[in-house]
Amino acid sequence: ELNVADYFRANKMTFKPVLIEKLDELLQAYASGRCDTYTTDASGLAAVRAGEPGYFDPDSGLFVLTAITLAARERCCGEGCRHCPYPV
């Protein structure tokens, strides 16, 4: 959220944050127009935009699955995924 606030402030824009914890609710809010945008880290956003299941983390060298990909599994795998949409 802080990155979004910084961006809007730098561009002299205002926004009202809508905090949504569950991925399916977030995607529904975005698709319906309730939210105009959502935020994640840059590589995660790039993967989502490209329709990729994930991205390579340059620091760890690991392939990290996006929350959208993980949500499609409909359950937590228990491996501690970085963007897991399911409460542990």
Image: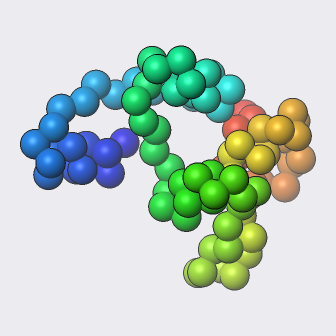
Please say if 23 is above or below 83. Answer: above
Left or right: 55 as drawn, with respect to 16: right
Q: Residue 77: image x %, image y %?
A: 89, 47
Side of 23 where 80 appears, left or right: right
Q: How many marks?
A: 0
43 to 15, vertically: above or below: below
Give the x, y percent position of residue 59: 59, 81
The scheme the figure's colours follow is rainbow
Give the vertical position of 36 relative to 40 (above or below): above
Tell me which residue sits at (87%, 33%) in the image: 74
Q: Residue at x 45, y 44 (%)?
A: 39
Quadrant location of the N terminus?
top left
Left or right: where 47 falls relative to 88: left
Q: Is residue 61 visible?
A: yes
Percent position (x, y) of residue 68?
Answer: 71, 43
Residue 36, quarter of picture: top left
**The C terminus sits in image quarter:** top right
Determine the image quadrant of residue 63.
bottom right
Q: Position of residue 62 (x, y in %)?
A: 73, 75
Residue 26, image quadrant: top right
| Rendered residue at 14%/52% (across/down) | 10
Can residue 44 be seen in this snapshot? no
Q: Is residue 53 left or right of residue 43?
A: right
The one nearer the camera, 48 or 83, is 48
Q: Which residue ends up furthest to the front in the rendered image? A: 50
